[in-house]
Image (spheres, rainbow, N blue to C red):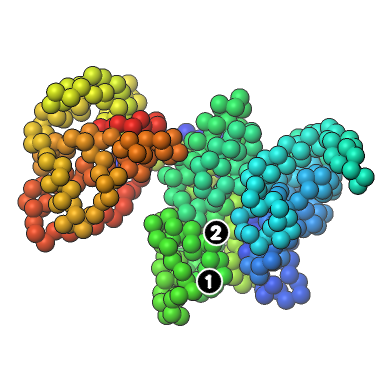
Amino acid sequence: MAPTTKHRSGRGIAFGLIFFSSSEAPFGDDKYRLVIESTKFADQHDFSSVWIPERHFTKDGWLYPNPAILQAALARETRQIQLRAGSVVLPLHNPLRVAEEWAMVDNLSNGRVGVSFASGWHPNDFALFPENYEQRSEIMYRGIETVRKLWRGEAVQVKGGDGNQVEIRTYPAPIQREIPIWITAAGNPKTFAGAGEIGANLLTHMYNQSVDELAEKIRIYRDARARSGYDPESGQVSVMLHTFIGKDQETVRAQLQGPFTEYLKSASYLVNAIAYSRGQKVDIKTLSEQDLNDYLLFVFDRLVSTQRVLFGTPESCQELVNQLKAAGVNEIACQMDFGVDSKLVLESMPYLNQLKELTSETSNEVDYPAPLATESFSSSHQANGHASTVQEVATQKTYIQEQQGQPTEQNDRLESIQKRCREQVSLPGFYQTLSERGIQLAASFQGIEELWRRDGEALGRIKLPAALAQEADLYQIHPTLLDACFQVLIAALPQKTSHTEEALYLPTGMHSFQQYSHPRQQVWS
């Protein structure tokens, strides 16, 4: 079992609602009943927020082409819950109109609005502004600054109908002096950093990332806030999770399995994201009906087993909530509109409230598995006459002990490891053996320069090929370096295993990975 470390969260974790994929089916003519009734319940039970998306030209989410209009309606139904857009696709709008519309909702709600901005991704959505598609990210960030200025009451210069520049302000004046802003991030670390750089909050999901991966991206976000002069801890991270809480596991599964797998058939973006996170590409249109149903059932089980959804009882879902809290998440935005009968969803709300209450009662100190760590240091080392600089030696024990103020054990130092690994490995023979065992690597992925081993332990000097050196800064860690580190692990297999003719190497994955510093072009593993 991995050792645990204590992570303290200065605040609890909030619960909100988010809508994204409703269809017209549940209530016939009363299309917005689920949104309105669940939001009224959330408002009465101290939920933090309700998020309404912007969706266009699709039956998956066709209730939500304009979040401002629906939030204006919810403003009159509620008293305290925050009313947020999740998201406004800013390149599809004139920022002047965005500032006007949301200032109106801010007045109707007595200062309760917040807006998450997104750059958009689907080309069809840009039928509204096709000229903005190629530069959508840049246009989003420019538009955010315009909205911020207008919200503060500042004037902006724009071109009028006669072609002349005119200075304008928007009205009505909002209640809040500053508009609370989020950036919607699907998973790209650059988007997380971009949100931090402009001092925005963050809205993300777990379709294609684990808790550990999310924790690393939250660190990137908070580091970017600090570099840009913002308080790194004040930024709010909201995470969207498919949610359904009931009285027992068996009932929840029976109520969810059919509707959720049907929902996945229309939510191809979700299926693709899950497949991508596993290194796969799946075209569900090519599958037979039976294969499709089997695959979607697998996806359903996979989401539950890897804890990327809140499906279960209040007690069974506490662990995931605590892990998210320890990872730096401030709010869980619960998505419940994925095909389950709306009556069942509304009946499940008290169980969701129980989960909220249970997690608010737990201690701020949470046991959380300590990540396998890379402790960086620099020292001169002579290896077979080759002078080199040690960049990284990966040992879990070193990291944990040094965090506790204890000295590093000498047998974890590079010199001690190499003394134990007396057998120097022929690299051409090593890569030939890998090829024979099913691991065929292109020359650019054969990154080990020198390799020593014994049964159960190995040490390798790894260098990024010169042809790839210019790509190093494009990655947190270049794939060639990371892959070569795993190749060193293979060298540690016992000789009787690695020399078996029938042996076939099948990498199955890793439990967790966390990077503590940017590696240079040469590392030790």
- Is 520 displayed left or right of 57 in the figure? left
Q: Residue at x 61, y 55 (%)?
A: 121
Q: Which residue lies furthest to the bottom in this view?
A: 289
Residue 407 in the image, given as x and y percentages of width and height: 26, 20
Report helix, strand or loop for mark 1. Answer: helix
- The image quadrant where one finds the C terminus is top left
- Is 50 displayed left or right of 507 in the figure? right
Q: Name the residue under label 2.
A: 242
Residue toward you, 504 or 474: 474
- Amino acid carrying label 2: it is His
- The image quadrant where one finds the N terminus is top left
Relative vertical location of residue 297 with respect to residue 483 in this rendering, above or below: below
Q: Mark 1 points at which residue?
A: 265
Q: What's the CA distance linking mark 2 and mark 1?
A: 16 Å
Residue toward you, 117 or 260: 117
Report helix, strand or loop for mark 2. Answer: strand
Q: Which of marks 2 and 1 is nearer the N terminus?
A: 2
Q: Residues within 10 Å of mark 2 (few under 14, many from 20)?
A: many
Residue 384 lies in quadrant: top left
Residue 232 in the image, given as x and y percentages of width and height: 56, 30
- Is 23 displayed left or right of 371 in the figure? right
